[in-house]
Image (spheres, helix red, strand yellow):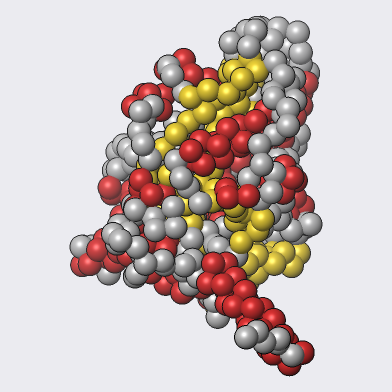
């Protein structure tokens, strides 16, 4: 007996089929990578070293904290990738300052429906990696494509591995390696019950003129894994990579799996986002800080590029900055630094050695006596920065009068100070710890035997402007003329070739000075003096200027404190990093935070 399904039965059957199809699709292409049951359980917490970094298989990790710890083990100059990450939002919530969601799509090729190419490559062929020369050629291609390179011996050691395979495209006439691709067999790595595989590091030589190199490499890898019984071939590709067109042409389709990476210099552009439109308008001092903040995922809103103002925001905390000056510096601390006579009294009370000083209204008799006793004087405005209005090495009363007039152009109160012989040492103190120290030397020129001193200064200024983004130049003013005259020359003289002539007495970068890092050799007594001065002012970020005979010796005299020191002048010391650490401690990597806590516990009591 036969029976026929009526319209209602047929409709119900189609509905059940559609439901089954949707359920199957949810299981195989859901937000969480599937865990299929098999005869043998997959290996837990699986990863594989690819030379340039590790592929970490996120679906094998039951604990997101363990996945984060695995990524923290990433070694320098390498890039680990955690793919198929379950609940990426949970992983990021556990370490938002250390990891980020990679802006890449995952694509999958169903190998059961793969169809070989109708034509074969022309002018080249695909083969397995067979020699160290191949390995060196792969690195050459990686470097040309700005990819992370690998030690050639690593490729060579892996040539017979079952879990990882390298293919290269070779020119059939010249033998030159034209491209490369890497494949990983998931079954071999962690007993993948789905029998999956993945494609990595597809790259071709940018100088190669052959067509279809990338397609031929992908097809060869797909056919290799078909022969091994793999079910699919996955790959991860940046969302805006033009190679997506090739993958879609070959039958790859997007699947909703996610990749997490650790924040490092290699990945920097992936998690910092595009530069703000007015970023380039910032000066180098502000740019350095904004760039460091954005590396950590801290939002940077530029509020006044010309003035160097920007706002940094992270989580629920927002701080307005002007270069290295932030809201954490109080108005009281700023006012102490603003008036050099107040600064001097403040640090002197804390036991910091200061030079003798008086004001210009003390009268000619007192000034003359002071000049005779000191031998040489420094005249400077009580308020001001960047070396403006300062005269050094004043030796006559007439010069004192001229220097006072020049200083009064910047401030009505003028200070007269004994000149301490030595070098100008700038110490950057952040959070009451030394971060950088540098000797600042006054501008000088070297004669070429043809140009006048004025022309040499102009030429030197042009080079300094180019090297510092326009921040440094030698002023052609009365102080420069006086310094040149003290060296025995006039501005229109043409000195003999090779003659070195000092043209400024102050070492400020803005007046053409140069800076030389001495952080590793600075004497502990100088560090103690700088920290004591910072604590006396109670300022979290400050540049302390000392006059020293040598950076390696204990002798010094305090000169001044700068509440907005130029952090960019002290590279490669981590000034911007420590500044951002101060503003946003939770943006520090966990290891760095623990190190800072340990260092604080072990600090001598006098530094508390």
Single out the residue that lies furthest toward the bottom.
8
x and y percent of residue 475 in the render?
73, 37
x and y percent of residue 193 in the render?
39, 58
Q: How many marks?
A: 0
x and y percent of residue 547 in the render?
43, 43
Q: Where on the picture, by quarter, is residue 350?
A: bottom left
Q: Judge left or right: residue 607 versus residue 452.
A: left
Quadrant assignment for the C terminus: bottom left
Q: Is residue 191 visible?
A: yes
Q: Is residue 471 above or below residue 37?
A: above
| Foreground pick, 467 / 498 | 467
x and y percent of residue 255 in the render?
61, 61
Q: Residue at x 63, y 7 (%)?
A: 174
Q: Residue at x 38, y 27 (%)?
A: 159
Q: Is residue 22 above or below residue 488?
A: below
Q: Is residue 319 above or below residue 451?
A: below
Q: Residue at x 20, y 62 (%)?
A: 602
Quadrant assignment for the N terminus: bottom right
Q: Is residue 314 visible?
A: no
| Foreground pick, 193 / 405 | 193
Q: Residue at x 37, y 67 (%)?
A: 37
Single out the residue that lies furthest toward the front.
1
């Amino acid at each position: 007996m036969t029976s026929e399904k009526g319209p209602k039965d047929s409709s119900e059957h189609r509905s059940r089929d559609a439901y089954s199809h949707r359920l199957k699709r949810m299981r195989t292409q859901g937000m969480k990578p599937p865990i299929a049951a098999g005869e043998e359980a997959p290996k837990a917490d699986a990863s594989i070293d690819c030379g340039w970094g590790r592929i970490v298989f996120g679906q094998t990790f039951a604990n997101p904290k363990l996945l984060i710890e695995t990524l923290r083990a990433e070694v320098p100059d390498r890039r680990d990738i955690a793919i198929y990450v379950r609940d990426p939002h949970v992983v990021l919530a556990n370490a938002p300052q250390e990891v980020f969601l990679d802006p890449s799509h995952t694509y999958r090729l169903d190998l059961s429906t793969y169809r070989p190419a109708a034509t074969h490559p022309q002018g080249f062929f695909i083969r397995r990696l067979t020699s160290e020369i191949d390995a060196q050629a792969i690195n050459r291609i990686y470097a040309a494509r700005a990819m992370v390179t690998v030690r050639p011996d690593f490729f060579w050691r892996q040539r017979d591995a079952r879990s990882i395979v390298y293919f290269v495209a070779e020119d059939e006439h010249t033998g030159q390696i034209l491209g490369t691709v890497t494949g990983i067999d998931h079954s071999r790595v962690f007993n993948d019950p789905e029998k999956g595989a993945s494609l990595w590091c597809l790259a071709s030589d940018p100088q190669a003129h052959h067509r279809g190199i990338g397609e031929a490499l992908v097809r060869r890898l797909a056919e290799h894994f078909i022969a091994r019984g793999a079910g699919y071939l996955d790959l991860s590709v940046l969302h805006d990579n033009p190679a997506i067109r090739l993958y879609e042409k070959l039958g790859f389709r997007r699947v909703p799996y996610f990749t997490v990476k650790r924040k490092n210099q290699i990945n920097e552009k992936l998690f910092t986002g595009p530069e703000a439109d007015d970023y380039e308008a910032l000066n180098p001092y502000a740019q350095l800080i904004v760039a460091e903040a954005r590396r950590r995922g801290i939002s940077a809103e530029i509020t006044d590029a010309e003035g160097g103002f920007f706002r940094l925001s992270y989580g629920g905390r927002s701080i307005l900055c002007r270069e290295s000056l932030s809201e954490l510096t109080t108005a009281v601390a700023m006012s102490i630094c603003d008036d050099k006579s107040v600064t001097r009294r403040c640090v002197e009370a804390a036991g910091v050695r200061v030079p003798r000083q008086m004001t210009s209204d003390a009268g000619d008799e007192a000034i003359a006596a002071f000049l005779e006793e000191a031998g040489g004087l420094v005249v400077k405005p009580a308020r001001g920065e960047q070396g403006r209005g300062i005269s050094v090495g004043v030796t006559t009363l007439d010069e004192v009068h001229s220097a006072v007039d020049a200083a009064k152009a910047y401030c009505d109160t003028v200070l007269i100070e004994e000149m301490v012989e030595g070098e100008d040492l700038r110490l950057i103190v952040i959070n009451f710890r030394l971060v950088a120290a540098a000797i600042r030397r006054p501008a000088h020129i070297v004669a070429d035997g043809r140009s006048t001193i004025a022309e040499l200064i102009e030429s030197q200024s042009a080079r300094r402007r180019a090297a510092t983004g326009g921040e440094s130049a030698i002023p052609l003013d009365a102080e420069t003329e006086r310094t040149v005259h003290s060296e025995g020359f006039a501005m229109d003289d043409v000195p003999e070739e090779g003659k070195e002539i000092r043209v400024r007495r102050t070492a400020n970068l803005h007046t053409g000075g140069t800076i030389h890092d001495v952080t590793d050799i600075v004497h502990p007594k100088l560090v103690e003096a700088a920290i004591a001065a910072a604590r006396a002012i109670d300022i979290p970020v400050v540049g302390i200027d000392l006059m020293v005979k040598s950076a390696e010796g204990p002798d010094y005299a305090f000169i001044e404190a700068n509440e907005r020191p130029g952090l960019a002048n002290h590279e490669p010391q981590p000034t911007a990093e420590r500044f951002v650490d101060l503003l946003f401690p939770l943006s520090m990597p966990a290891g760095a935070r623990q190190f800072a806590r340990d260092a604080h516990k072990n600090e001598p009591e006098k530094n508390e």
